[in-house]
Amino acid sequence: MPTEFPSARAGLEGALQPDAFPMPEKPKDPDLDAADRISGLDALELGPKKDKGAFGRRAWSATWPKLLAIAIVIGIWQLVYLSEWRPAYVFPAPLDVFTELGELVTEPKFWDGVRLTMTRAITGFALAVAIGTLIGAAVSRFTPLRAAIGSLITGLQTMPSIMWFPLAILLFQLGEEAILFVVVIGAAPSVANGLISGIDYVPRTWLRVGQVMGMKGLAKYRHLILPASLPSFVSGLKQGWAFSWRSLMAGELLVIVPGTVSIGVRMQTARDLNDAVSVLAYIIVVLVIGILVDQFFNTADRALRKRWGLTGS
C-alpha cells in the first residue's frame, strides 16, 4: 500500500536513527587529556617490543658469567689457603666455610636474624626513598632552594655513614631508631640526587612540546617530567640501596639492640669467639643478599631502558 505522506514518514525514520541527534560529549578531564596527548609522543620514543626468545637460552646466557666469576673467586681462595699465607683457624678453606653455611641455613634462628635485618633494611630504605623523592622534587622545582641546599645534599651523599653513629647513639641511645636514622641519612641524598639529575636532563624539546600541548602544573610533572626522569631516578634508587645496606651492616655491628639477634650481631659474636669460619659464612650471606637486590634493580633498569628504546638488543 503506498504511503500517503512519504515526506513525513522519511522524517520519522530519520529521527529514529541512532546518530540523528548525537549526545553532547562530556568535558574531558584536563589531566586525562594531557595523558592522551602525550601518548602519541610515547609511541614515537618507546622502543619496539621484541620477542623474548627461548627462556632457557636467555637464562643460561645470564647465568654462566656469574658462575664463572664464582668459580674463579673460589679457586683463588683455595690457592691462598693452600699457600698457608695465614693459619687455617684465621683463613679457613672454602669447603669448611660452605659446610658451615649449609648448616646455618637449616637453623630457624638464622632465618630470624635474616628477617630482622631485612625488615630494618626495607623500612629504612622506604623512608629514605620517601624523604629523598620529596627533597629532590622540591629542589628541582625551586631555584632558590637548589642554591641553598643543592651542595649540602651532595656533601651528605659523600659523607661516610659511620660518622653518623656517635650522634645517632647520643640522640636515640642503643635502639632501633639509631640504626634507622643512619640508614635514612645515608640513602636519602642519593635518591634525591638521582631525581634531580633525571629532571635536569629532561630534553628541552620535550618541555616545549608539553607546553604547546597545554601541559601545566601537576599534569606536566606527572605525564612528562617524572616519566622522562625515571631512568636516572632508578639509578639513584640503586645507589641509595647500596648506601643504606652498607649503613645497616655497620649499624648492626656497632649498635647492638638488647634482645635482638640480627646478621650483624651474629657476625660480631663470631668475631668475639675467633670463629673465622662463621665470620666468612656471614660475609657470604651479606654478599648474596646484596647481589640479589642488585639483580632486582638491574632487571628493572634493563626493562626500563628496553621500553624506552635505549638498548641495542
Image (cartoon, rainbow, N blue to C red):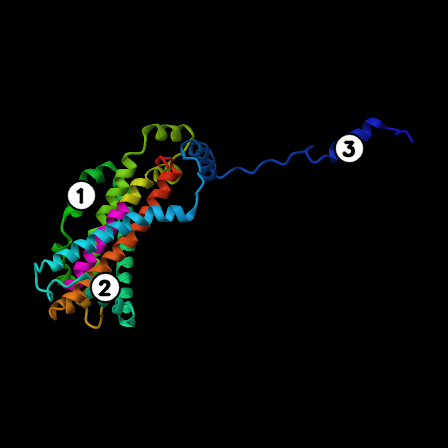
- The image position of residue 185, as x and y in percent, is 20, 53
- The image position of residue 181, as x and y in percent, is 20, 58
Which disc number belongs to residue 96?
none
Is residue 124 in sight in this rendering? no
Range shown magenta:
236-255
Q: Earlier in the sequence, mark 3 or mark 1?
A: 3
Q: Residue 257 falls in which quadrant of the image?
A: bottom left
Identified at 21% across, 63% down, the residue is: 95
For the residue marked with disc 1, what is the amino acid? Thr
For the residue marked with disc 2, what is the amino acid? Phe
In the picture of the structure, the residue carrying the numbered disc 2 is 98
Q: Earlier in the sequence, mark 2 or mark 3?
A: 3
In the picture of the structure, the residue carrying the numbered disc 1 is 154
Q: Are marks 3 and 1 in contact (CB under 8 Å)?
A: no
* Crowding at mark 1 (Cα within 10 Å: few <14, some 14-19, many 20+): some
Q: Kindly report the secondary structure that dominates the magenta region of the rendered protein.
A: helix
Marks 3 and 1 sit apart, C-alpha to C-alpha, by 74 Å
* 57 displayed left or right of 149: right
* Crowding at mark 2 (Cα within 10 Å: few <14, some 14-19, many 20+): some
- The image position of residue 42, as x and y in percent, is 42, 34
Q: Earlier in the sequence, mark 1 or mark 2?
A: 2
What element does badge 2 sit on? helix
Identified at 30% across, 54% down, the residue is: 292
Identified at 49% across, 39% down, the residue is: 29
In the rendered image, residue 239 lying in the magenta stretch gets the answer yes
* 303 displayed left or right of 192: right
Identified at 22% across, 69% down, the residue is: 261
Image depth: mark 3 or mark 1 in front: 1
Which disc number belongs to residue 13?
3
